[in-house]
Amino acid sequence: MSVSARYTRYLAFALVGLTFFYLVSRSSLEIPTSSSFAPARPTYEEVKGEKAQSAVSVGLDQSNSQTQRVNATFVTLARNSDIWEIAKSIRNVEDRFNRNFHYDWVFLNDKDFDDEFKKLTTALVSGTTHYGRIPEDHWSYPDWIDQDKAREARQEMGRKKIIYGDNEAYRHMCRYESGFFFRHPLMMNYEYYWRVEPSIELFCDVPGDPFRFMKENNKKYSFVISLYEYYETIPTLWDSVKGFMKSHPEHIADGNAMEFISEDGGETYNKCHFWSNFEIGSLEWLRSKQYIDYFSTLDHDGGFFYERWGDAPVHSIAASLMLKADEIHFWNEIAYYHVPFTHCPSSEKTRLDLRCHCKPSENFDWAGYSCTKRWFDVNKLQKPDGWDSQQ
């Protein structure tokens, strides 16, 4: 091919390109500008220091979920060093549920959160984020605790290799989750909470709005996994509970779930509890006189420090005694993992409908160390399809 022919061909291509660009630029289609998009939600710098706002409680409409929310929030107790583990949890919760609802998220810490933690979590959460510091008197020894005795107890449990037995911070955490998180100023604006911990996973899409389900069905507490507590961590917990029941019979509900936690009418505790690293519940119930009286009794008996009472049995016993059994709910549809246990819906249809990716054989519900089968049996509830194949 000659040089002149090659240049002629290039010139023809150039003319065609220029003509196309001219036609497009003169067309009626507008190039979007930044003003065409919805305004970005505020960053944490713009909202920090603001008081948490109460959401309007109206009926759920799945087609307009952003404006049909219950007055509720996610809540996470975390350290700055948990940033990447909590990032995974947030991404899971947002992808499987909150991207459609934009609920707020409250983060609590016994230290100030740093800017890196705030920037990342604000970027990940679709709702408004709030960051609170725990008051010192909620994360320290009360006056009535003998700290020498508490230290000796930790050392002894450490020698016995009891899980978290020698961990001082873990005890402060359990006491805080048992009696104070729901009284933090940031939490006082909400009616319901969903607790989320670092490194959890949701395996399925969450159908509907669990917060609205709780409100519309008068549920006060809910769970996905239940199991037996280590007796070595709570040897005198039930003695304290019995003292509370004797002093406050008016706080014990008719139609309660006592049978779930005791097999002899309340004489002894069978160690069953709801695993509290996942819980959705009523903040108004936790702030009630009944629950505060209960926590105060346990707190003054000293078992959070002289033993290693966990917030899971503390919450579970309270719910089982002070709520009606039908005010407690099991979430079969919310597939969940926290090391080392998994809740995976037993029904294949449920797993497919909710786009689950959990392994059915890893479902803990019907295993020997789970208390979920007992929950179904004592409350005469129908077990989900497929449960018998997972025993």
Image (spheres, helix red, strand yellow):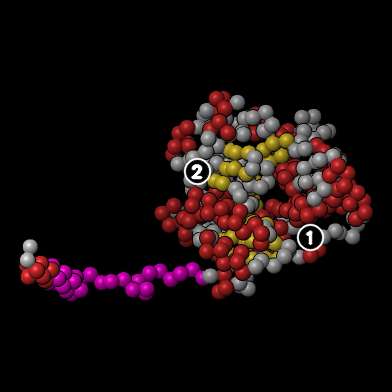
Q: What's drawn in magenta, residue-wise?
A: 13-42
Q: Residue 25's spot in the image, x, y percent? A: 20, 73
Percent x, y of residue 4:
7, 70
Circle 2 residue = 204
Residue 170 placement, left or right of 382? right
- Residue 368 in the image: state x and y as whole percent: 67, 28
Q: Which residue is mark 1?
A: 139
Report the side of 328 relative to 251 (left or right). Answer: left
Q: Amino acid at mark 1?
A: Trp
Above or below, 216 against 185 in this view is above
Q: Where, quadrant-wise, is the C terminus in this rendering?
A: top right
Residue at x 44%, y 39% (from the top left corner) = 353
Q: Of helix, strand and loop, which one carries label 2?
A: loop
Q: Quadrant of residue 71?
A: bottom right
Q: CA distance from mark 2 to mark 1?
A: 35 Å
Q: Residue at x 63, y 39 (%)?
A: 341
Circle count: 2
**Is residue 41 within the magenta segment?**
yes
Disc 2 packing (10 Å; few <14; some 14–19; many ≥20): many
